[in-house]
Structure formats: C-alpha cells, structure tokens
Image (spheres, helix red, strand yellow):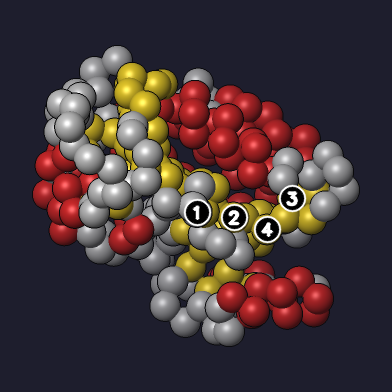
Amino acid sequence: MDEKLNYLKKYNKNINILSINEIDKIQLGMIPDEWYKIFKQKDVKERIDLLLKIWKRYVSDQLRNTISYLNEYLEDVEMMYDGNSYSVLYTIKNSKGKYLYYEGKNPKDKFENAELENVWGNTPEPIRNFYENIHNGFYYYASESMGLVTFDSVTYIGDEDLEWDLEEKLEINLESSFGFFTNGMGSYIVVDYSNCDKGNGTFWSSKIKPKYNIDFWSYVDEWIVIGFES
C-alpha cells in the first residue's frame, strides 16, 4: 500500500486512498449511491464485480473490449480523495505482468466546462450515460490520457489552433465539436453533436488532417485497451 500511495502522490501530493471508516463518513449525495455499497465491501472481487456491473448496465455494447479486459486483469478498485474530489483507483495487472493505475472520476463532480454544459443535452446518449452514471472521465492516472477525459478537460475544437492549412472543406462543424478522448499527444476522438446520428466521430489532430466518419466508440474502446497493454 505504501509503495502504491507513494507512486500516486508523485502526480497528486494530496491524494489518499480511503478506508471503509472514512467512506462511512462521506456526506450522502457527494458520491453515487452505489459507491457507498461497493466500497464498504471488504472482498476485492465483490467490489470489482459490483463496479463492473455499472459499466455493463450503461456501456456494455460501446466498451465491450474494455469491460472484458477489466474483468480479466483488474486486481483492485479503491476510493480516493484529494481534498477536493472523490474518484476510483483501478489497479490493473496487464497481460505482461505490469501494474497500471487508472482513475475514474466522480460522476457527481461539478460541471466545469461552459461550452460543453450549454449543449450537453445534444451530446449522444451513450456518452452522457458514461459521464453521468459511471465516471466523469476514465484515464491512465499518471498522464490523464489514453481514456475519456474529465468534463473540464474535454476539448472544444472551436478553440483549437491548427498547424495545417484549411484548404479543404471541413466535414465537421468546429463550433459543435468536442474531443472526449485523448492519446496525450495532441490527438483526439471528436464528436460533432450536430452530425453524429450514426455514432460517427472524427480522429482529430492540430498537426495532421482529420480522419472522418470513424466509429466513435470502436476507436475509444480499442485505444483504451491499447493503453492497458502498453
């Protein structure tokens, strides 16, 4: 535990893993109701099973490979607090025997993204389901990437500075496009809420021309698993 906590504190010195007694003292409504039940379980397997049931309930079709991987390689889930917000720590021992730590933020977090909040109701339902019921972002802890980012880190593409020329007509509307997934190297998987009826997204980078009409969830699912295996 000390080794894990020392690692976590390298990236957030205020982070702490909560005990069952500390979870008991969390004010009602601060975290999802199901979290109280899950994280009072002493049995690790029971905690994992209960948490993954929430994933399956809301995104079983969209993130089937991610869920399958977690089901096989997830070793523990614990609740964390950094003095401001609660989150879930996922401890994964991947197929190569390497330990990875992923963070899933609290879906009850304050909505800190004015551009996105104004159009949240237009965002595809599966995305809203994830953020409102599972996590406000799920990503590799150390880099906060290779996953769905938190509300405040969702990129409004209308504000992006491009390094490539706009000599070709764009197939998305920048003013209605948001990047929900990042690989940590300046590339995003974007949804244009005005043109996503078929679940289509765009692979977007400020450095190279976009790749249009990709399946948003297929790319997110695949890239999360790639991150697990890195």
Residue with the mark numbered 1: 184
Q: Quadrant of the C terminus?
A: top right
Q: How packed is label 2: few (under 14 Cα within 10 Å), some, or many (20 or more)? A: many
Q: Quadrant of residue 36?
A: bottom right
Contact flag, marks 1 and 2 (Cβ < 8 Å): yes
Disc 3 from disc 2: Cα separation = 11 Å
Disc 4 or 2, which lies upstream in sequence? 4
Residue with the mark numbered 3: 92
Residue 193 in sight: no
Q: Could you tell me which residue is drawn at 53 percent across and 74 percent down?
A: 81
Disc 3 from disc 4: Cα separation = 6 Å
Contact flag, marks 1 and 3 (Cβ < 8 Å): no
Q: Does dot 4 land on a helix, a strand or a loop?
A: strand
Residue with the mark numbered 2: 140
Disc 4 from disc 2: Cα separation = 6 Å
Contact flag, marks 3 and 4 (Cβ < 8 Å): yes
Q: Is residue 119 left or right of residue 72?
A: left
Disc 1 or 4, which lies upstream in sequence? 4
Residue with the mark numbered 4: 101
